[in-house]
Amino acid sequence: MSSPRRVSLLTLGCARNEVDSEELAGRLAAGGWELTEDAESSDVIVVNTCGFVESAKKDSVDTLLAAADTGAKVVAVGCMAERYGAELAESLPEADAVLGFDHYPELAERLGEVVAGHRIAAHVPADRRTLLPITPVERPAASAEVALPGHGWGPRVLRTRLDDAPVAALKIASGCDRRCSFCAIPSFRGSFVSRRPEEILAEAAWLAEHGVKELFLVSENSTSYGKDFGREHGGTRALELLLPRLAAVEGIERVRVSYLQPAETRPDLVRVIATTPGVAGYFDLSFQHSSETVLRRMRRFGSTESFLALIDQIRGFAPDAGIRTNVIVGFPGESEADVAELERFLVAARLDAVGVFGYSDEDGTEAEGFEGKLDEEVIAKRVARVSALAEELTAQRAEERIGDLVDVLIEDVEDEISGRAAHQAPEVDGACVLIEADMAGFEVGRIVRCRVVGSEGVDLIVRPDTDTDTGSDTETGR
């Protein structure tokens, strides 16, 4: 009897890619492949690439080259493979195949062909927005004919966990209908399509059965969820209706929403996120800037005052809610006055986490052709300036939490006990470090009520609160 074929999966990029990798793992396992973390012993290494910005593309290429050094066959999938396809294959002969999203349903078979020495024609990119109807409500039916990672699995959850972490990303939609002038994602991820609530709930229950305590809902734009349903599943209110149902899934202690578009964040959605038991009071708002002039050139909406009004609305419901954002500095035409306006917003907003990125041209975007490009040196100075301010402000915000009670999901008990409170998303928003806690009394996946006793940057130093912690999971997830 021949030994099973072995495959390793390497994932780069965002949480959406992590979900896609677990779908690919499920498909490969169902197709007879043995998954292994040991790349050296693999027949094939599949690299799930990121193609969002230049640095991510470089990381993807470096990972593909390193994989080729093992002697195993190497296959590129993911956003960079989808976006560049044959161009990537030509410039990177070390990759034995470059496959797009349309190859995912038959990936097990395609890898078999690669191992057998057959050459597979490289994916030929196309603007994926053209693959589905322009009208959102017509897309759910049409999407059955288009490969959308994470969609249309039917009654069986087609996913294999690649780790045993107590938090897992859960995709609620794919694609984006917005036309931000700096972003290429819609061209290779396609138009916006929501997943059916029943499919999401089934996957949530499956994740709970596999030890997950926190669901991290991901998409390109979560505030658009349900707009393609019409009235069938609540239309644009679909996310407000879905969140309490997810929070009620047995075994799930906390549900977190990511990627909210400020211009589409409705008062009812704010209320549901801020007040529903089991839903984290957490708002991942993609402001990008606050100068109206820059926002209009970005093809976005908003201003310092409208954004501050949204933040006030959030804190009116939940004063301790976590709010994070990303901002882009150095956008074409950005003036010193625009930077000062962004700084004014950040000072007034008191956000918990801020990612600061310098503008760079992206292939095929509208902004690539804009006039008023700034020198790289100017952009770098502005990134450093705004980053320093953001670091100071977020540290102050963390310090303001000293004395508060927080519910910490324990994620690490190796060298120290650490985890995350409700206002902290995985990997990007800091962590909680427990002190004066007995290592033997805590395990990964437990939620512990703690008192904040100190801070270091955005990280919190916390102590188990013996007056309120009962030694079991809390109910609210806050």
Image (tube, rainbow, N blue to C red):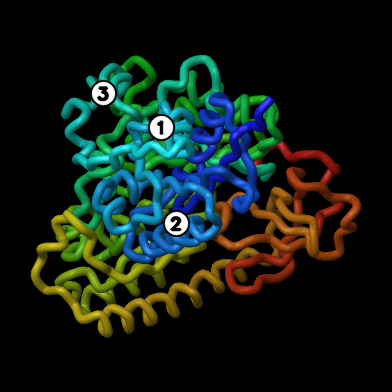
Q: Quadrant of the C terminus?
A: top right
Q: Is residue 405 rendered to the left or right of residue 337?
A: right
Can you see residue 223? no
Q: Between tags 3 and 2, which lies in front?
A: 2
Percent x, y of residue 23: 50, 33
Q: Is residue 327 rendered to the left or right of residue 133?
A: right
| In the depicted structure, whether residue 59 falls above or below residue 265 | below
Q: Quadrant of the N terminus?
A: top right
Can you see residue 397? yes
- Per the image, label 2 sits on a secondary structure element best described as helix
Disc 2 residue type (three-letter): Leu
* Residue at the spot of label 3: 139
Percent x, y of residue 405: 71, 55
Q: Are marks 3 and 2 in contact (CB under 8 Å)?
A: no
* Residue at point 86%, 52% (across, down): 466
Crowd rating for badge 1 (residues with CA inside 10 Å; few <14, some 14–19, many 20+): many
* Residue at the spot of label 2: 64
Mark toward the start of the polypeptide (1 vs 2):
2
Could you tell me how far apart the alpha carbons at marks 3 and 1 are, in whole angstroms? 20 Å
Disc 1 residue type (three-letter): Tyr
| In the depicted structure, whether residue 25 falls above or below residue 375 | above
Q: Between tags 1 and 2, which lies in front?
A: 2
